[in-house]
Amino acid sequence: MTGQEFKGMIDIHTHILPGLDDGAHSWEEAMAMAQGAVKDGIAAVVATPHIYEDSGITPEEIREKARKLQDMLDSQEINLHVFPGAEVQLAVDLPDRIRDGRLQTLANAGRYLLVELPFGLLPVYTDEVLFELQASGVIPIIAHPERNESVQKDPNLLHGMIRKGMLAQLTGGSLRGNFGSKVEYTAKLLLKHSLVQILASDGHRADRRRILLSKASGVVADLAGIETAQAMTSLNPRKITQGIVFDPREPREIRGLSGFVHTMTFRALR
Ligand SMILES: [Fe+2]
């Protein structure tokens, strides 16, 4: 299998490789996560270990581990393709690191970089760093914006980013209430306004926070239609792993957010 021939869902955000971050603890757990993914209808995953400024994990190391996991899966005839990738924490030197080849792009296609914003407020250099990445030909994909405090308070921040050509990835568990009602509320708001283009699991373990997409995809279908669910779980992730640039559905600005009702609704959530 070349990795481009399969049909089915593709999960572009997983912590399936062991020994790199807080994801899989062992190769056995990685294999169990892979088996769970296949059972859920997932055909391919991108392994995206957390990359912090000082984590010292190199693209070569990620690619080597992804290859090893692929060999293990192939030898047991488990039908899952594993691509190398990374979830890179926003930092002021990201443009330098991408230019020097020190950051692993998604599926090694050189086009998309999964970027994690800090959970609290956005640093002042955010816009500039994201712009510079785009100027060097790399499209940032914002990982789970619904979990970021600045986006929760002003979801239209994301509207500006999408209009500039970036993409955003919603985490399945957010839609299902796994991170609390503020995150769930924001996730649904973003989804209904076409402010997110990809659904991913952000799976960390074999027992909880697993690599699953089918249930969350059902929630997307209920809220935004089956075509959106297919685009977010299959079509768009496939283009991303192939490094193909595409025009997502036109994002819509969220109206009335500065109003009293939104503020009170949001305050009432936990
Ligand atoms: Fe993650």
Image: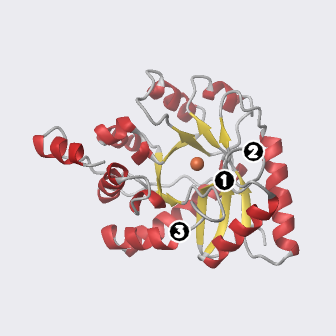
N-term-proximal mark, 2 vs 3 = 2
Pointers 3 and 1 in contact (C-beta within 8 Å): no
Residue at image x 62%, y 38%? Answer: 88
Marks 1/2 in contact by CB < 8 Å: the verdict is yes
First in sequence, mark 1 or 2: give its number: 1
Residues at marks 1 and 2, CA–CA distance in whole angstroms: 9 Å
Sort mark 3 into few (<14), some (14-19) or many (20+) by Cα contacts within 10 Å. Answer: many
At label 1, counting other C-alpha atoms closer than 10 Å, the crowd grade (few under 14, some 14-19, many 20 or more) is many
Q: Quadrant of residue 35?
A: bottom right
Residue topped by disc 3: 213
Q: Are marks 2 and 3 in contact (CB under 8 Å)?
A: no
Q: CA distance from mark 2 to mark 3?
A: 23 Å
Q: Hey, what amino acid is under mark 1?
A: His
The residue positioned 73% from the left and 69% from the top of the image is 32
Q: Which quadrant is home to the N terminus?
A: bottom right
Residue occupied by mark 1:
15
Can you name the residue that lies furthest to the left here? 260
Q: From what the image shows, is residue 163 above or below residue 199?
A: above
Query: What amino acid type should be assigned to the residue bearing mark 2?
Result: Leu
Please say if 96 is above or below 199.
above
Asked if residue 154 can be seen in this view, the reply is no
Q: Position of residue 202 (x, y in %)?
A: 57, 55
Mark 2, residue position: 20
Q: Secondary structure at mark 1?
A: loop
The answer to whether residue 114 is left or right of residue 164 is right
Residue 94's spot in the image, x, y percent?
62, 28
Secondary structure of residue under mark 2: loop
| Secondary structure at numbered mark 3 | loop
